[in-house]
Image (cartoon, rainbow, N blue to C red):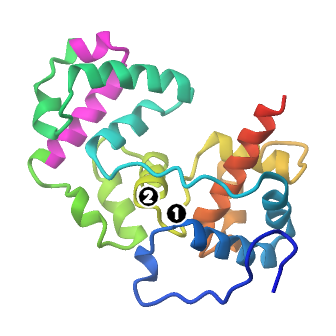
Amino acid sequence: MSTGTGIRQSTVVRGKDDARHRLDRQSIADGVIELGKVDPVFTRLFAENGHPPLWQRPQTLRTLVHVVLEQKVSIVSALAVMERVDALCPRFDAASFLAVPEDRLRTAGMSGSKVSYCRSLAQAIADRTLSLAALRQLDDDAVMERLVAVRGIGPWTAGVYLTMALGRQDAWPSGDRALAVGYAESWQLDDVPAYVALDAHAEAWRPWRGVASRLIWHAYLEQRRSR
């Protein structure tokens, strides 16, 4: 049965491992259907922009470092710094990263605070107080708790890792500027909502906030490509 959006209508069935479900193209399609029942704007976003990318990232220290570098700067700027850090640390395991002198990381473009945060992450992995492999078996709240326990890792960084690396169905990167702006544009609001207000509104999108964020990001990027 067609929904009129190009998404196959299906019955959404999730097992007891729901909290650890990793999104794929079919589950995103399922999520679009369910979100459209809550708010038809999601159906429109899919119809206008098509299937959003998965934006998958590896479950690694390098991914976490990259997300830290993206804090409060443009994606392009963070990528340029990341490429220079890659050159300093080709293996990119915890021991190798900790062996890179701090002054060389700063020369590569990392701020002093981000050097400190990323070294805290690497140290937590090296001394096994943080296991990235173990995060795969935890529910979303427990993953957030483990990550924000590391110095310099806040809800946004942890939420992006939960969204992009773990690919959780209900992940929500609170404090994401592009999400707030994209939401204001797609819902035709006069003002960009405060993060706390957007978080509260997104509660209605559970358990599909990971799909909602991708649809909003995709619309946000398509708006800028068309300008």
Magenta segment main secondary structure: helix
Question: Which residue is the site of mark 1?
Answer: 171
Which three-letter amino acid code belongs to the residue tagged 1? Ala
Q: Quadrant of the C terminus?
A: top right
Callout count: 2
- Of 99 and 151, nearer the camera is 99
Callouts 1 and 2 close, C-beta under 8 Å = yes
Q: How far apart are the alpha carbons under marks 1 and 2?
A: 6 Å
Q: Taking 130 as reference, is 34 above or below it?
A: below
Q: Secondary structure at mark 1?
A: loop
Res 116 → quadrant: top left
Q: Secondary structure at mark 2?
A: helix
Q: Taking 21 as reference, is 104 above or below it?
A: above
Which residue is found at the position 40% from the left and 60% from the top? 166
Relative horizontal placement of residue 59, taking residue 214 as reference (left or right): left
Please provide the residue range marked out in magenta: 104-125
Which residue is found at the position 28% from the left and 47% from the top? 60
Of marks 1 and 2, which one's residue comes earlier in the chain?
2
Which residue is found at the position 44% from the left and 46% from the top? 157
Res 94 → quadrant: top left
Q: Crowdedness of circle 2 by 10 Å Cα count: few (<14), some, many (20+)? A: many
- Of 185 and 149, nearer the camera is 185
Q: Position of residue 117 (x, y in %)?
A: 30, 34
Q: Position of residue 16 (x, y in %)?
A: 42, 90
* Residue 220 visible from this viewpoint: yes
Which three-letter amino acid code belongs to the residue tagged 2? Leu
Question: Which residue is the site of mark 2?
Answer: 162
Instruction: Check residue 107 for magenta coloring.
Output: yes
